[in-house]
């Protein structure tokens, strides 16, 4: 093997995550805009199943329309992407906002909300997610700074796949990990070595024991609440190959030990039906299993796009309310879904905030997955 490869694993076995502060009551007064915006941010981050968490930058507009029994609100919000991937259990309000020099991402969102007595519901939102500065603008400001590359770029995915393989070879973990998704890929040119690829990606623990003869790409993820997750950053030079992999580990939310003879439960909802689109790019469909589903992401096609939140018993998404909900951060909502659909963004290098409710939330009779 050519080149000198360094693998550094940063373990975060114990994470002290503070509980989210209580939400303020949303009313129909103009002064309630901050409370409405904060409620909206919780809902957006709950529904945002891929990429990175967002924080509020500013409230640009707040309209109140009085109706019988309450009011309807329309908010215009500017959001900024944080460095916390959605698998990170840290509350979004405690996450650091990505610096502009690190290729910051913003979202302009229009939110509609209904308030009836003390019941506030987010009924709809749409966001335009984009880089704060385009690649062309950044080149003028910093010609040597890396630029964001499409998440499904061939060379970028090659660097990620090599990093995942090296990760599984150089770890004391009990089980193999497979790729959950690619978060971002940056590309830059270094005069002494040539093209350099800097990737961020999320991994999920599988049922396959480390060191077994099973091909890791055939391994199935553990159930969301029982799986360890890892968020990694890798550096790869086209001339010399993989240089480094640095990872943080996040423990499972359910640490209950299995009883004698009890096996890990089987969960099918880690990988969904249709392959997603990302901006203008779309990974090849490739082979399908017996249920018509694509192979696991560990086979080289990362999950990109958006995941639907849990559905209610009638097959439709539950309405977003400010009360009678579990505490924020108590569950990994990004894993729990029954359907998987694409979410098209204008920039294939980003994970956009998908519109809610999803335009496809009413399955057609021909929708068999």
Image (tube, helix red, strand yellow):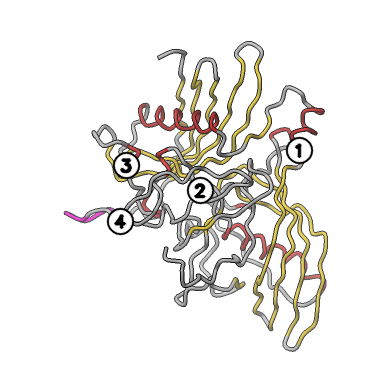
**Disc assigned to residue 266:** 4
Residues under labels 3 and 1: Cα distance? 38 Å
* 277 lies above or below 135: below
Q: Which one is earlier in the sequence, the residue at label 3 or at label 4?
A: 3
Q: Nearer the viewer, residue 195 or 60?
A: 195
Q: On residue 218, which mark appears? A: 3
Q: Which residues are magenta?
A: 257-262
**Which quarter of the figure has residue 36?**
bottom right
Question: Which quadrant: the N terminus?
Answer: top left
Asked if residue 56 lies left or right of residue 52, the reply is right
The crowding category of the residue bearing disc 1, from other C-alpha atoms within 10 Å (few below 14, some 14 to 19, many at least 20), is some
| Mark 2 and mark 1: Cα distance apart in space | 27 Å
* 314 on left or right of 132: left
Nearer the viewer's eye, disc 4 or disc 1? 1
Q: Earlier in the sequence, mark 2 or mark 3?
A: 2
Residue that numbered label 2 is attached to:
87
- Residue 201 location (% of width, % of height): 51, 38
């Amino acid at each position: 093997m050519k080149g000198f490869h360094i693998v550094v694993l940063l373990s975060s076995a114990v994470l002290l995550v503070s509980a989210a502060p209580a939400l303020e009551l949303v009313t129909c007064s103009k002064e309630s805009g901050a409370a409405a915006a904060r409620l909206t941010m919780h809902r957006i981050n709950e529904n945002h199943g891929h990429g990175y968490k967002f924080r509020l930058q500013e409230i640009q507009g707040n309209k109140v329309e009085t109706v019988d029994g309450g009011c309807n609100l329309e908010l215009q919000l500017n959001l900024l992407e944080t460095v916390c991937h959605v698998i990170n259990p840290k509350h979004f309000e405690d996450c650091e906002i990505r610096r502009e020099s690190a290729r910051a991402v913003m979202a302009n969102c229009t939110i509609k909300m209904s308030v009836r007595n003390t019941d506030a519901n987010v009924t709809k939102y749409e966001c335009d997610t984009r880089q704060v500065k385009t690649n062309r603008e950044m080149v003028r400001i910093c010609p040597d700074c890396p630029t964001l590359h499409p998440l499904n770029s061939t060379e970028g995915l090659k660097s990620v796949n090599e990093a995942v393989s090296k990760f599984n070879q150089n770890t004391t973990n009990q089980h193999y990990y497979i790729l959950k998704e690619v978060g971002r890929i940056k590309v830059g040119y270094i005069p002494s070595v040539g093209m350099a690829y800097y990737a961020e990606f999320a991994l999920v623990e599988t049922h396959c024991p480390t060191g077994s003869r099973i091909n890791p790409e055939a391994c199935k993820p553990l159930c969301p609440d029982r799986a360890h997750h890892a968020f990694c950053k890798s550096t790869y030079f086209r001339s010399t190959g993989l240089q480094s992999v640095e990872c943080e580990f996040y423990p499972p939310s359910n640490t209950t030990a299995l009883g004698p003879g009890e096996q890990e439960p089987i969960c099918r909802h880690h990988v969904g039906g249709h392959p997603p689109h990302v901006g203008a790019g779309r990974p090849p469909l490739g082979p399908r299993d017996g249920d018509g589903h694509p192979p696991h992401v560990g086979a080289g096609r990362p999950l990109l796009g958006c995941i639907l939140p849990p559905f209610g018993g009638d097959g439709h998404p539950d309405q977003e309310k400010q009360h009678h909900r579990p505490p924020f951060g108590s569950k990994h909502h990004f894993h729990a879904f029954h359907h998987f659909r694409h979410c098209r963004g204008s920039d294939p290098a980003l994970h956009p905030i998908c519109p809610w409710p999803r335009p496809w939330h009413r399955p057609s009779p021909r929708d068999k997955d």
